[in-house]
Image (cartoon, helix red, strand yellow):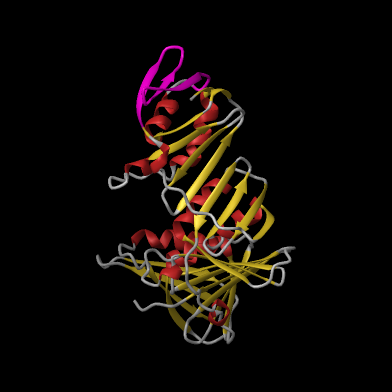
Amino acid sequence: MKFSVENINLIKLLQNLYTLTSNNLSLPILNNVLIKVFDDYILFIKTNIEIEIIAKMSDCNTIRTGVITVSIKKLYNICRKLPNNSIIYVSLKDKKLIIKTKNSLYSLSTLPDKGFPKISYRKNNINYTLSSNILLNALSCTYFSMAKQDARYYLNGILFKISSNIMYVVSTNGHRLSICETSINFNILNLSIIIPRNGILELMKLLNKHECLINIFFNRESISLIINNYIFTSRLIDGIFPNFISVIPKDINIQISLNLKELKSALNRIITIINDKSYGIKLIISKNKLVLIANNLDFEIAKEIIIIKYDGKNVEFAFNAIYILDVLNVLQCKILTLAFTDNGILKISDSMSHQSLTYVIMPMKI
């Protein structure tokens, strides 16, 4: 096996694979990247068993075909610290990966490819094409509501549901719900899959670097996306996602409108004194006034007043301030409407030409 490549090109490629790196002592080969050299291109493959990323490099000079695995951490850090304009010569000799430049020489230990784990593929019987921007935006508007290591394993990810040319991207941790509804032109009926949390986070990193049309393939066990010269694959969560439509409150009796930036600034200021993980704040709504109050275990108090148009009954609710800020950080509207039920469930909505966003946040006790 032998090839040469510009260092800057190799660095960019390895950056997209390096995020799957983990110090796995029980299965050392998971710390490696699989390198497969063909006549006209090279494949670099990284996996953590649940997620797999395949990167194809054509901008290189392949001299001799072959396959081997090597530590991605060492390979990436060596390339990263070499001059960007270097030409790197890579070869395999006596089970060592030799990395040479004009003034540098490295010899790295390798492991054979036979022990390298691969996600087993079954026939992908559903596929479609979608803009990477549309998918990234839908994920960016919902990913923060995913659960983290919840016993209800089906909440530790995002639901993709397609029905009647509408794509729903939904996440919830049981205390808040995020829904992105997007119009699409797919002739697919009643598709529903759950992508795990780690898969979503890695996919977002990849989508953030590539603006293109992507091909998406589904089956019962995995989802694969072709993103330019990358193939991203993630196993799916085998479970039934809750009926998110039934969670959206319909009996809205309290509604206020205010400037989004004003509320966002007030929340960012008031959370500075909160020193517990609940980030609880009180929202007191009275005639033409919204008051935000927070305190902490040191008996410190913060208070913010926002003038609003409201002539209803006085109410007081408590919420996790971070939950509200997460929503405000992705909304594009200037004037925000907060809608409450009598028992304090908060609903926030925003609609654009091809997309609709809905957020539900449950109240808390403080």
**Magenta stretch, main secondary structure class:** strand
Q: Residue 29 vs residue 25: left or right?
A: right
Q: State whether residue 67 is above or below residue 302.
A: above
Looking at the image, is 133 positioned above or below residue 9?
Answer: below
305 within the magenta span: no
Q: Quadrant of the C terminus?
A: bottom left
Q: Position of residue 13 (x, y in %)?
A: 52, 35
Residue furthest top in the image: 103
List x then y, in percent, for residue 361: 48, 74
Query: Residue 192, position in %: x, y?
Result: 58, 69
Q: Residue at x 68, y 71 (%)?
A: 189
Q: Quadrant of residue 252?
A: bottom right
Q: Is residue 90 magenta?
A: yes
Look at the picture and state if 214 lies above or below 6. Answer: below
Residue sitting at the far left: 298
For the image, the number of numbered tags is: 0
For the residue pair 340 and 150, the one nearer the viewer reads as 150
On the picture, is 337 further left or further right than 50? right
* Residue 352 rendering spot, x and y as whole percentages: 70, 64
Q: Can you say whether 55 is above or below 365 in the image?
A: above
Asked if residue 208 can be seen in this view, the reply is: no
Question: Looking at the image, which residue is at 44% across and 74% down?
Answer: 174
Q: Residue at x 52, y 87 (%)?
A: 313
Residue range (magenta): 84-110
Considering depth in this image, is 317 or 155 the residue closer to the camera? 155
Residue 117 seen anywhere in this rendered image of the structure: yes
Name the residue located 43 percent from the left edge and 65 percent from the top edge: 156
